[in-house]
Amino acid sequence: MSRQSNRTTESKKMLWYLPFISPSASMRHMNSELFTLTYGALVTQLCKDYENDEEVNKQLDKMGYNIGVRLIEDFLARSSVGRCHDFRETADVIAKVAFKMYLGITPSVTNWSPAGDEFSLILESNPLVDFVELPDNHSNLVYSNLLCGVLRGALEMVQMAVDVRFAQDMLRGDNVTEIRMKFIKRIEENLPAGDE
């Protein structure tokens, strides 16, 4: 009698299976979605913590700068890229190697200034803004401002002072995302006395 009661409870049990991920599924794609959602949560928290968008923009830039200062070492080790000889070569390495390596995209380098000290990175797609819509009360928020800080921090570590800002943003209704970069100066290494 007790055996029969066990059978009925066993037949009513639900079987749970872990989702199957095919071998062809891209782990990078799953990681980029997690990164995008995590970044969105970070920006949301910053918007709650600070009163205005300008302060959030400053915090995103500051965080990006700190990331860039550390990320350049990883980039140089993994990419085996040598020293760039001019700002044009630097722009190509940023677009074709760095963005591809870390964000999986390859922006185009355009709109060079006549002096060759300023250019634009045009992003046809920005993985940071997947699943994002800016609310009307955050019209001054530069959602992806972290990227500007990363570029500024990384280039500063290789003795280049640059100004980086968003000129266009798809989140604001523009057709593309444009990051404008301007070379300011080459930073001289200050060696301590006796280390020359």
Image (spheres, helix red, strand yellow):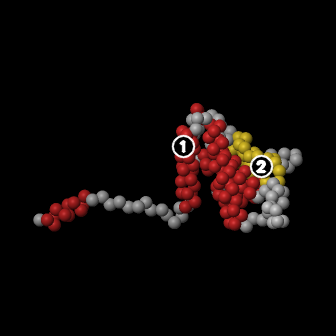
Kindly identify the residue that appears in the image at 62 percent across and 40 percent down: 56
Residue 146 visible, this angle: no
* Residue in the image at 80% along x and 61% along y: 191
Say which element carries label 2: strand
Q: Position of residue 38 (x, y in %)?
A: 54, 50
Residue 102 picture location, percent across and down = 65, 57
Q: Residue at x 74, y 57 (%)?
A: 157
Q: CA distance from mark 1 to mark 2?
A: 28 Å
- Circles 1, 2 touching at the beta carbon (< 8 Å): no
Disc 2 marks a residue whose amino acid type is: Val
As shown in the figure, which amino acid type bears the numbered disc 1?
Gln
Where does residue 140 sit, x and y in percent of width and height?
Answer: 65, 35
Residue 88: assigned label = none
Residue occupied by mark 2: 162
Q: Is residue 139 above or below residue 81?
A: above
Can residue 48 be seen here? The reply is yes
Q: Residue furthest front?
A: 193
- Around disc 1, counting alpha carbons within 10 Å, would you say few (fewer than 14), some (14 to 19), or many (20 or more)? few
Vertical placement of residue 159 versus 180, above or below: below
Q: Earlier in the sequence, mark 1 or mark 2?
A: 1
Please, what secondary structure does the residue beneath circle 1 have?
helix
Mark sitting on residue 45: 1
Could you tell whether 43 is left or right of 117 in the image?
left
